[in-house]
């Protein structure tokens, strides 16, 4: 497909979503209805419309296809609804523009050696006797099979309880931002949104990044790091690893980072738009009840939460 043809298809898909929302508002004038009929008379637009309806039907398999639209569940004024479409349209396209909503996003790690589904934590035993608990929506790869002493955490985070290294080879955990090594003990390591995090419960860890002097993290200490460097933060290991008990503790955390955690526990899509991207949030959230957690954020912070059907929540 040429770039021009691809752009035309994408435009038709987006316009189909806009029309779906407008039609569900039941406010169309005869002029608008005629405009819709004219738009749909184009062959490419008709295909985009039919594909959208089929996808919406799959999103609600227990509801007749003619009532499957996400817009059917909207209960916000039409003007605001259109503003949300403009502000968070990337999220709407992500939700409605692919054949399978969550599968198209979260099955990217099917080749992972270990993975945990959305909303479910998982605990596994490694070959050296270590016990690894994976956060929901996490993916972990062996770096060098068959050993489990060297792993890459590509999504989510893990809590690893390791025996002491007998052969001198430390446990090694890579993230996109660097390498964490430990000879034993208890270690929480992984990614949250745009940064990696390390927290040590027992023992000592070493963080290595290209071109930088290794940094040591003692028991009880926690560090966040990116390509730009690292920052020690005040949360102790018990709070950082509270996700293993179904609790997430945020301490002045950017709202997009908190939403990244929530998205690993919710079957829909949660988006942050506009000025809400700059907001920082503190609080204790129950990961088993994300709708309640979203309301908790909206009640305690200067942000507006709008729910779009059962599948999309937007902070703005």
Image (cartoon, rainbow, N blue to C red):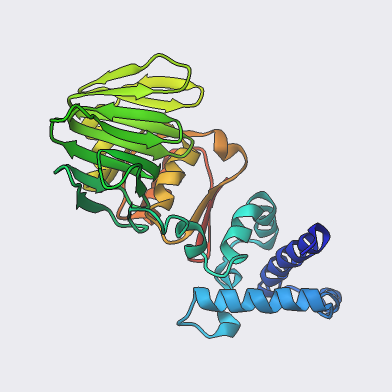
Q: Residue furthest top?
A: 213
- On the question of residue 295 being in view, the answer is no
Residue lying at 54% horizontally and 50% vertically, measured from the top left: 271
Of the pair 264 and 70, the residue shown nearer to us: 264
- Residue 137 vs 62, above or below: the answer is above
Of the pair 131 and 102, the residue shown nearer to us: 131
Which picture quadrant has residue 291? Answer: bottom left
Horizontal side, residue 11 vs residue 21: left or right: right
Residue lying at 51% horizontally and 38% vertically, measured from the top left: 302
Residue 253 in percent (x, y) is at 42, 32
Residue lying at 32% horizontally and 41% vertically, measured from the top left: 151
Q: Quadrant of the N terminus?
A: bottom right
Which picture quadrant has residue 99? Answer: bottom right
Which picture quadrant has residue 19? Answer: bottom right
Residue lying at 42% horizontally and 26% vertically, measured from the top left: 225
Residue 76 in percent (x, y) is at 60, 61
Residue 316 in percent (x, y) is at 58, 45
Horizontal side, residue 50 vs residue 205: left or right: right
Horizontal side, residue 169 vs residue 191: left or right: left
Residue 150 in percent (x, y) is at 30, 38
Of the pair 197 and 275, the residue shown nearer to us: 197
């Amino acid at each position: 497909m040429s770039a021009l043809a691809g752009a035309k298809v994408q435009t038709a898909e987006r316009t189909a979503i806009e029309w779906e929302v407008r039609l569900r508002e039941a406010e169309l004038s005869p002029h608008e209805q005629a405009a819709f009929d004219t738009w749909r008379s184009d062959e490419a637009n008709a295909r985009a419309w039919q594909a959208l309806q089929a996808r919406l039907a799959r999103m609600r398999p227990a509801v007749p296809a003619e009532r499957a639209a996400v817009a059917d569940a909207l209960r916000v004024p039409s003007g605001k609804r259109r503003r949300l479409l403009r502000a968070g349209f990337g999220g709407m396209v992500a939700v409605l523009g692919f054949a399978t909503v969550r599968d198209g996003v979260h099955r990217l790690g099917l080749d992972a050696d270990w993975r945990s589904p959305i909303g479910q934590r998982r605990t596994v035993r490694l070959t050296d006797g270590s016990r690894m608990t994976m956060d929901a929506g996490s993916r972990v790869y062996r770096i060098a099979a068959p050993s489990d002493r060297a792993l890459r955490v590509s999504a989510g985070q893990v809590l690893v309880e390791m025996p002491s290294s007998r052969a001198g080879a430390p446990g090694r955990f890579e993230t996109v931002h660097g390498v964490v090594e430990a000879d034993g003990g208890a270690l929480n390591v992984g990614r949250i949104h745009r940064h990696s995090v390390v927290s040590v419960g027992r023992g000592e860890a070493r963080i290595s990044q290209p071109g930088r002097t290794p940094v040591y993290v003692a028991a009880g200490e926690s560090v966040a790091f990116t390509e730009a460097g690292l920052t020690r933060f005040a949360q102790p290991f018990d709070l950082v690893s509270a996700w293993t008990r179904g609790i997430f503790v945020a301490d002045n955390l950017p709202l997009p980072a908190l939403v990244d955690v929530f998205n690993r526990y919710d079957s829909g899509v949660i988006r942050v738009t506009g000025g809400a991207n700059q907001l920082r949030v503190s609080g204790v959230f129950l990961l088993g009840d994300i709708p309640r957690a979203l309301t908790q954020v909206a009640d305690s912070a200067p942000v507006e939460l709008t729910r779009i059907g059962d599948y999309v929540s937007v902070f703005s």
